Image (cartoon, rainbow, N blue to C red):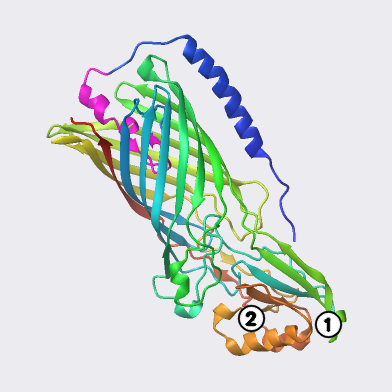
Amino acid sequence: MKFACPLRLDIVAFVVIAIVAGAMSRSAEASPAPVRQSHDPDLDITRPTRFNASVAGGSGLIQAISPDTLPDGEIVAGAAVTNNDRDPGDIDIFAYSFQGAIGFGKRVEAFAKVMPWVRANSAHLEPVRFPVPPLDLFVDTYPTSALRSGPYFMFVPTLPYKTYNPSNLTETGAFSSSGGENVFGVKFNLRSESRGNPFGIGFRGYLEVPTEAPRYNDPYPAFRRVNGASPSLNFGGDFLFSRIWKSTEFLANVGYKQTGNPERGLRVQMVDSSQSDPASFLVGDPVDMPLKLSNELRISTGWTVPLFHYYKAYWWLVAEFNHTRYVGSHTPTERLVHPAEVTLGMQSNFPWYKSVSIGAAWQLLLNNAGKGQQRTTSLKTADGRGDINFSEILNNPELTAEVKDYLQSRGATFSDASNKVFSTNNPAFDGWRNIPVAPALVQSEGHTNILAFVTWHVGRRR
């Protein structure tokens, strides 16, 4: 089992942001500039970058965030439905969220997001070939070591414990629903074109708090009430940039998220199947290895321009490109995809009540886990015999009972709510082998989504 060397990009990123922020804030305070506004008040009032509550947290577009902050005491509240596809496993995630922000002084904005409901669907996790963590792995040392090279798992870092019972899989997949994460943070503005600077610069910091109670490998129908999110806290920061040219505006964000590692992951017990006495059968104590999730390097750009003015309101084009690069030391996973998405949409304010805007967008995931290619499991012998997956969730009670009785009678123990695999090169166990080894096509469907969002500037009369 090999793990990547750790990268301390989180420390480097926050140090760089702190140095740049300190230098620019002193310069900004030393040279106040006049406020810059357009010739059309409606343009300034309804500009999406200064109007929307971004689903990422803070004022901005859809996910791209503006470096500008709301005026002192101004409040914005929004609701959104987003849909993202993630690979491997062909996971479809619907997130329903409420977000808001409030301005403090000229340069500070506090923001929050709550996500009461997230629905996740997958039809191609392949839990027989790639058991879902937490996993109890028993590795036979007779006649030769059966320690496989991996990867053992196939999950996305956002939902590492997503699971389902294959016998309860429908034509459209295995749906589950639960609460999502809540986000709390602060944004600071250093430069703003509203104050006469040539461009906008800011940064933000945030904390992500998961709300789903950790549960693992629940059988049907209980797995439909848990999405498999990590219970650990995450935190991060972003550098924010903006530039207005005539009536258009461009945003660019570069951020880094430090992901917390959950406790449950892989438990390895070495055994010797040529022995029956527990003292000789168990080779050392079991080794617990927590799941190590990737950290995230995030790049987000946004662009908005008024397309036309109709019935007392501007109709704005909103376009974004968002990319997440998973970095740092992590538990290996099969064909991890670093998602890159483009989003194109429109929004407008109600003509009779411009304190409210509504918008919708089309989104496309540009990459996948190798759709149409083939993959196979690493849980197999060198001559191509599959190992033994005797997890309860696979609904093979006879096999599960036989293998568990064999191991328990020789002193083996199991962790709570775990999947279970016995890796062995011993031909005496060929009758138990059930992990398919024939190459299977990578499945990755859809990847086009529709998003919707609404925003209300509280207290604004116009």
Amino acid type, residue under disc 1 in the picture: Pro
Labels in figure, total: 2
Instruction: List x then y, in percent, for residue 283.
Output: 84, 74
Instruction: Name the residue: 29% across, 30% down.
Output: 47
Magenta span has 33? Answer: no
Magenta span has 43? Answer: yes
Tag 1: Cα neighbours inside 10 Å, few (<14), some, or many (≥20)?
Answer: some
Instruction: Name the residue: 39% across, 11% down.
Output: 33
Q: From the image, which quarter does the N terminus lie in?
A: bottom right
Instruction: Name the residue: 63% across, 29% down.
Output: 15
In the image, the segment drawn in magenta is: 38-65
- The answer to whether one can see residue 2 in this image is yes
In the image, residue 259 above or below residue 439: above
Amino acid type, residue under disc 2 in the picture: Phe
Instruction: List x then y, in percent, for residue 337.
Output: 55, 53
Q: Secondary structure at mark 2?
A: loop
Report the residue marked by disc 2: 390
Report the residue marked by disc 1: 278
Instruction: List x then y, in percent, for residue 87.
Output: 51, 58
Q: Secondary structure at mark 1?
A: helix
